[in-house]
Amino acid sequence: MFDDFFIRALVAGIGIAFVAGPLGCFVVWRRLSYFGDTLAHSALLGVTIAYSLEFNIAVSIFLISSAIALILIQLQKKTNLPSDALLGLLAHSSLAVGLVVIGFLTFIRFDIMGLLFGDILAVNKKDLVTIWVGGALILLVLRLIWKPLFASTVNYELAQAEGLNPDRAKAIFTILLAAIIAISIKLVGVLLITGMLIIPTAMARNLSDNPQKMVIFAIIGGLLSVFIGLFSSLEFNTPSGPSIIAAALVLFIFSLLKVKQTIQLKN
Amino acid sequence: MSIENNILVKLNNVGFQQNQKWLVKGVSLQVEKGKIVTLIGPNGSGKSTTAKIALGLFKNIEGHVEKFTNNIGYVPQKISIDWTLPLRVRDFMFLTDNLTEDVIDEALSLTGVINLKDKSLGNLSGGEFQRVLLARAISKKPDLLVLDEPVQGVDFTGEIALYELIKEISEKLNCGILLISHDLHTVMSATDHVVCLNGHVCCSGSPKEVAKNSEYKALFGEQAAQTLSIYEHKHDHVHTSDGDIKKN
């Protein structure tokens, strides 16, 4: 069954959607979408390192993204530059360095479009194992830190005062973000991973009145985006990442109708 | 040792500075089981900072804090919930602890907002929101309650009812309460110990002692000393927030 590239891409996408839903909710709630972008852009550097050292791509991306996250936290402490400037600095410089390194590695043939926007043909059986095992681990860890992470998202001081450990939860969450980027880069691509995290989540917010519902709708939105996106990618021969994200956008636009309705009801 | 003395938290000569400015300095106080300690003082006098020091929210403090319990309920002075996070009252009640529905219903009934359980937090009025915050803090039956202006935005009769409730809770749960307030007249009657802050401890003692203190008068004016007369007005019924009338 997994011999068909399309089935592999579909199975990969389903796995990613299950993880992206809950993580994406926290990215939106904690206002981390630009932070996610920065980690994702640095993933390109991880890919080049993996290729040049003949190292596992997912592990390499995971390590580089985590390192960038640590550097960011240090920079935030040591400079007076505002966070958004620091994020931009790291996002674009790591993307630039990654592309420059690719330029030097002339002996390896890169599919740059595939790296940036995802490639439906690129997913092999080993990637499926990485996505599903890695994804299950990410969800398990998220389940374990849910209480302190969620409570500190609502109010940091309240969580800390009542004996939860928000700083540890935040650090672990950052690592989880690096991990989902590592497992989803092949299908969605460096430039669009954050879209996979936040667009189905934004749609879910329009349809939900409580956090659990929002997580479930975000997963459903992600699954639908993957299905619609991959089928149209196959049909119209478009890159997989943009097709998935465009499908997510259409779903988001539909969800706005629901918001409009509730606003009218209130009036 | 301190468990026998019923001490829950003890601040020894603590201080905290931010951007080279001391927000508060040289504060010593302790909260015991079943006792209400009230912090009063003008804006910027370091009341919230002192409460946060007691809760262990700051890392670089001067002096030291001894805490003898980890079962703490906290009502922060300000809490804002982002629109992106859909949160109903019931979700908020489960925030830091795994409680049962019954326990949560009981707490919400005590503060008179059980009818709001399925409402979205973003749609509550200021007073309703404070009642929910208080309900959440007491629902876990804490040893120590830290309440930072818990009745802000609550209407006048509700304010008195909530202060009475706070006193009731301290007796029923035998928990210690660190209360921050500037409603002098209602708060003082329910308080065991008052600490008057203005960057440092101006004076402290029982409400009556503090009222006579000259530094207190200098801070709050002569009138404030007179408003300390204990609130003894009694109703034979109460109005719950959903419009019902309950006989006492």
Image (cartoon, coloured by chain):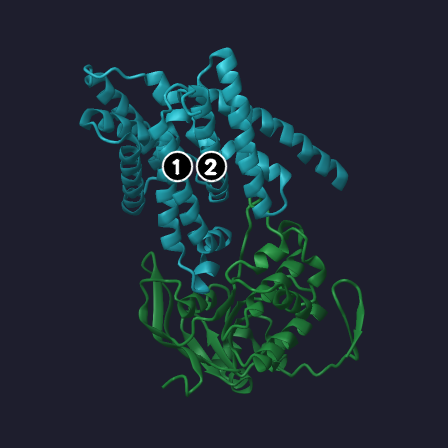
Chain colours: A cyan, B green
Closer to the camera in the image, B179 or B231: B179
Asked which quadrant contains residue A261, the reply is top right
Compared with residue A165, is residue A88 higher up or lower down, i.e. above or below?
A: above
Q: Residue B234: horizontal and vertical position, in percent?
A: 75, 81
Element assignment for label 1: helix
Compared with residue B217, is residue A141 higher up or lower down, i.e. above or below?
A: above
Question: Marks 2 and 1: CB-CB under 8 Å?
Answer: yes
- Residue drawn 19% across and 25% down? A52
Q: Which chain carries label 1?
A: A
| Residue B63 seen in the current view | yes
Rounded to the nearest angstrom, the CA distance separating label 2 from label 1 is 7 Å
Mark with earlier residue (2, 1): 2
Numbered tag placed on residue A20 in the rendering: 2
**Residue at the disc numbered 1:** A180
Query: Quarter holding the N terminus of chain B?
Result: bottom left
Query: Quarter holding the C terminus of chain B?
Result: bottom right
Element assignment for label 2: helix
- Residue drawn 37% across and 54% down? A167
